[in-house]
Amino acid sequence: MCGIVGLFDLSGRGRLPERGILEGMNRVQRHRGPDGEGVHLEPGVGLGHQRLAIIDLEGGHQPLFNETGDVAVILNGEIYNFAALTRELQERGHQFATRSDTETLVHAWEEWGEGCLDRLEGMFALAIWDRRQATLFLARDRLGIKPLHYALLGDGWLLFASELKGIMAHPGFRRELNPQGVESYFAYGYIPDPLTIFSGASKLPPGHALTLSGSANASSDPSSWDIVPRSYWHLDFSDGGSADFSPGAASTSNSDASFEAASEALLVRLEAAVQSHLVSDVPVSAFLSGGVDSSAVVALMARLSGERISACTVSFDDPRFDEAPHAARFARGLGIDHRVERAGSDHFQWLDHLAGDYDEPFADPSALPTRVVCQMARKGGKVVLSGDGGDEVWAGYDRYPFFMAEERVRGMVPGMIRAPLFGLLGRLYPKADWAPRMFRAKSTFQSLAMDSVAGHFHGVSVVSDVWRQRLFTSELKKSLQGWQAVEVLRKHAADGPDDHPLHRAQYLDLKTFLPARVLTKVDRASMAWGLEVRVPLLDHRLVEWSAGLPSDFKLRGREGKRLFKKGLVGLLPQEVMARPKMGFSPPLADWLRGPLQGRVGESLLGERFGDCGYFDRKVIQGMIQQHQKGLADHAAPLWSLLMFEAFLRRF
């Protein structure tokens, strides 16, 4: 795991980057790779790297070149099948000087060009400079586990970096807020790819690559500089038409026998994924929440590892949110080393650090406990395995059954009747944030009045359309020119599956929620401490296999993760399998009424926040009063505003 930065001259003039600028961009990402650093400059390009040494500790320093010195690579991530690729490339005559996974990339590029991406198994954001072709090649892994940002300056310099702070370190980058980024942030609680909070910067989307040639773009006219990422991977949902239900045979039957065969195949595939993610020259530990996903990963690690493993867990003072006792019982049963650390009000001083970690507003409250557990894990090593991704891949979120129920109603009631009928009911029905979701009829009626994509958007929104309209000033609304955050989902939906509503919901989450919220949270929280987190449940071969399974293998009625849990019978105790999902989130509403109450008023009603001109002060004041008196639960929008204020103050 590392941090990468770079400069590329798109003007075609072959200008030499300034060493001081490149080193400054590299240095601000030192936390991502405290074990070493390197920079390379030549006419037209500059590459920088901060290294966290995991494989080939003595070799593998970057930028890394081929034997002739005309192809260079910098990598953030791990290539898990590098040993097999190395053997294949050696048989084809390539000479290797190190044992690192990074060197595999320069020779794979020489052998297969852009097609090398199809052969990689791992998590990565990479940059390859080929002097022979005057070409810079950028790529991000299929599911967006590792980040990559880029920006084009008006003078023709393209900047790229693992984190936005690497781009912000360039003196020519202008920090102009992107209205679409602001709208998206308050809708989703994060800013989905390819948007960022800044108008001049973008995220390279997951499963995309970008090929740039200085000579091909030799022009002083910025409009001629062609920067269009291309997709190199597409996840195919086919409702059972493409999945092998056993390790060696294919089936398209949706029968009980196929379900049994698939459950047996699942464990084989899951074990292979965990095994591949254990490759390392340093010890590997794990995160253990006590839920099904992390418990499965830890159990397989204990089975496959030749050494005693260790796991880390975060606890909360409020037992409604605390899974630590369950994790402790599971750890004792496996006989593994287990450490627990509490995340509480004494960690609130980290709020400002969160703004520095993420470089743009990020409203997932679990970022705080994630930072706690990452700090704890780093004390014991450099690499951990996590259970992230299981809910998206195996339909484990509670919102999926609700969405499916709404879809059935949409299918039965024509839109010309449904929209006005349920729209009226949604306006008349009283709001009940305090009630369990199944009794929040107002929200359900509002969703049923919408089409499928808007209904999905309504279900995942942190701040509703109604509240964003109240919260935003006329100045911000005008700058949006009618653009709404739901357009992000509509664009993905146009390219996604249409055979089944569950597949559509999963596809949208895999394109937005997973990379921009879940994986971003873990990447920044872990790399703040120089810790590498691996996610075996997102092994792309396992994800592809799951996508090809029948929808009811994943969700039937209100039972999610059907096949996943069936395949784990015998590996996990019944207590873990049957316990209701808790999620990984602190008691945010109580914190905002208690220890954070003063911070909320001071931050959100102060002059600095008011001067940004984006938010209606009276609306914010009303939300604070209602929340603190217990009249409404405004925890999500207040936390979103709090983190936006922290971002403004930091940047």
Image (cartoon, rainbow, N blue to C red):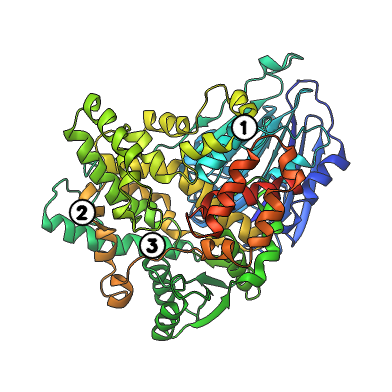
**Local secondary structure at mark 1:** loop
- Which image quadrant is residue 246 in? bottom left
- Give the structural element (helix, strand or loop) at label 3: helix
Q: Earlier in the sequence, mark 3 or mark 2?
A: 3
Q: Measure how far apart labels 3 and 2 are at the Cα level.
A: 27 Å
Q: Is there any visible trace of residue 290 in the rendered image?
A: yes
Bin the neighbour count of mark 1 within 10 Å (Cα to Cα): few under 14, some 14-19, many 20 and up. some
Name the image quarter holding residue 125. Answer: top right
For the question of whether residue 236 can be seen, the reply is no
- The numbered dot on residue 473 is 1
Whether 17 is drawn above or below 144: the answer is above
Amino acid type assigned to the residue bearing label 3 in the image: Ala
Residue identifier under label 2:
556
Percent x, y for residue 27? 80, 51
- Horizontal side of residue 384 vs 236, given as left or right: right
How far across and how far down the image is residue 526, in percent?
A: 62, 61
Q: Earlier in the sequence, mark 1 or mark 3?
A: 3
Instruction: Specify the label residue 272 is tagged with.
Output: 3
Q: Position of residue 542 (x, y in %)?
A: 36, 53
Q: Earlier in the sequence, mark 1 or mark 2?
A: 1
The amino acid type found where label 2 is placed reads Arg
**Local crowd at mark 2 within 10 Å, few (<14), some, or many (≥20)?**
few
Point out the frontmost of discs 1 and 3: 1
Q: CA distance from mark 1 to mark 2?
A: 44 Å
Q: Nearer the viewer, residue 201 or 304?
A: 201
Q: Which is nearer the eye, 307 or 583? A: 583
Q: Which residue is nearer to you in this view: 273 or 472? A: 472
Image quadrant for the N terminus? bottom right
Q: Amino acid at mark 1?
A: Thr
Q: Closer to us: mark 1 or mark 2?
A: 1
Quadrant assignment, res 506: top left
Do the numbered discs 1 and 3 sit on residues whose CB atoms are within 8 Å?
Answer: no
